[in-house]
Every structure is written in C-alpha cells, then in structure tokens.
Image: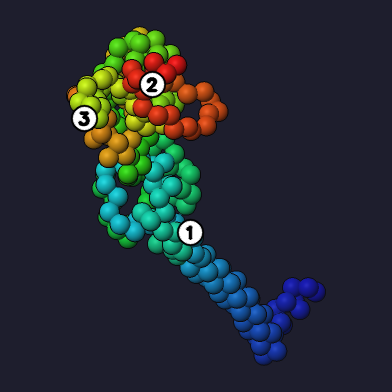
Amino acid sequence: MENIMSSKLFTTRQGTVLLGVIAAVIAAIALLVYLNHYRSSVNASNQRIPVLVAKSLIQKGTPGDVLARTTGMYTVAQIPKKQVENNAIVDASTLSGKVALTDINPNTQLTAADFGPGVGLANELNPKQRAVVVALGSPQEVGGQIGAGSHVDVWTMNNSQSANGVTRPTARLLYQDMYVLNAGTNGGNVTLRATSRQAGTIIFASANSQIWLVLRPTVATNVKPPAISSSSLIGH
C-alpha cells in the first residue's frame, strides 16, 4: 500500500511540484549556509591585528631592549589578518634579551625571525650610550670589590698649579654614579657605561692622570666634594 502511494506521489503532477519545492528549500538552505560561511571567512580575513612595524631603518645588532624602550623606531599598526606576516611581533616586551639579526627596512613588519639571542655589552647600551674601558690597579678598583652591575664615582689624581705657581697633586671628583658593565678581579680592565662626552673625558683622564673608582652603596645620595690637595689636607 505504501509503495503504491509513493509511486503515485512521484507520478502525479502535485507530487512532482512538492518534490521541486523540497529540493528548492534544501538548495536555499545550502546557499544560506555557504554564504554565511563565506561571510565569516571574509570577516575573519579582514580582521585587523596590532603589529609592530619599523618607522625607520633598524640596523643589524640593535638590542631588542633598546628598541622596546625607543618607540620612535617602530609603530603599532593595525594590519588586516590576511596581510600579517608569519610570527609577526605584536608585543615589544618579547624583544627583551634579543638583537636584530639583519637590517629591517622602514614600513616592514617586525617578525620573530628578525631577532635572536643577544650577546655582548652592546645589548646594555641605548643609542646615546657608549662602553669605555679603563685599566686600573687593585686599589683603584676597590680591591676587586667592583663588578658588573656596581655603581661607582670616578675620581682623578693629577697635578694642579696653584695661584703662586706651585704645582700640587690634586684629587677631583670627575663623575658620580656611573654603571659598571664589566670588571676584572683585583685589578684589570673596568668597563663603564658612559655618554660619548663622558667616554672622551675618561679616556683623556686615563692617559694624562690617574683614575680611582669609589664604590657606592645600593642607596646613595650625590654630593659635590671640593677638590682635595695638600693645602686642604693641612687644614684637617
């Protein structure tokens, strides 16, 4: 009986129309599903993601820590997802401890492949800082108590001519609170972090006088002591 009714459904005009309607409904549903999926994929590809982009040339060897602190070297751009490079950098803090492995041109996205582990003192310098080395004996280096990370005052010993023309040895404070990048043990080379001007002055002082370093405590205040000479010692 059911077979007879099914046969009539397929052979009668009404049955054919009904099947057509069902097929059209199924096709419409399939089209809606496809369009919704397509629209979702288009929206996803057009989604914008914040990515670090170079504003100026970033030279090979530039420390990531310096780059992260110097916002003038990069900008955060909203890039469509489909245009974002693989492993693009979205957070500057991930550059810590790394250096640029190659020159990065302006308007280029920063990627993880552009940076690698940093080695050397250059990673501890910003664009305005320099590392200057001074050769010192043990007493001038506080008996080996100075090491990487120490803070020191820099004094010089040289001969000064007084108003009456007499030459006397004089100790003068040159700089306060300088950071030690590296140091030998019980005398040797001490590497200080300095500005270009400070580096030049320290080089000159090292060649023409004697340099002494004074170790500062963790918490210290800056003072400005006068130059010390034989006359000032007699007063004490």
Q: Position of residue 179 (x, y in %)?
A: 40, 30
Up/down of 134 relative to 110, above or below: above
Query: Which quadrant does the N terminus fall into?
Result: bottom right
Q: In the image, which is nearer the foreground, mark 2 or mark 1?
A: 2
Is residue 45 left or right of 106 when viewed as pictured?
right
For the question of whether residue 105 can be seen, the reply is: yes
Please give the label number shown on residue 232.
2
CA gap, disc 3 to disc 2? 26 Å
Q: Nearer the viewer, residue 138 or 170?
A: 170
Q: Residues within 10 Å of mark 3 (few under 14, many from 20)?
A: few
Residue sitting at x 52%, y 23%: 217
Residue type highlighted by circle 3: Phe
Count the numbered circles shown.
3
Image quadrant of residue 235?
Answer: top left
Is residue 82 left or right of 20 when viewed as pictured?
left
Residue sitting at x 41%, y 41%: 65
Image quadrant of residue 80?
Answer: bottom left
Residue sitting at x 42%, y 25%: 152
Q: Position of residue 16 (x, y in %)?
A: 65, 85
Q: In the image, which is nearer the foreground, mark 3 or mark 2?
A: 2
For the question of whether residue 117 can be seen, the reply is: no
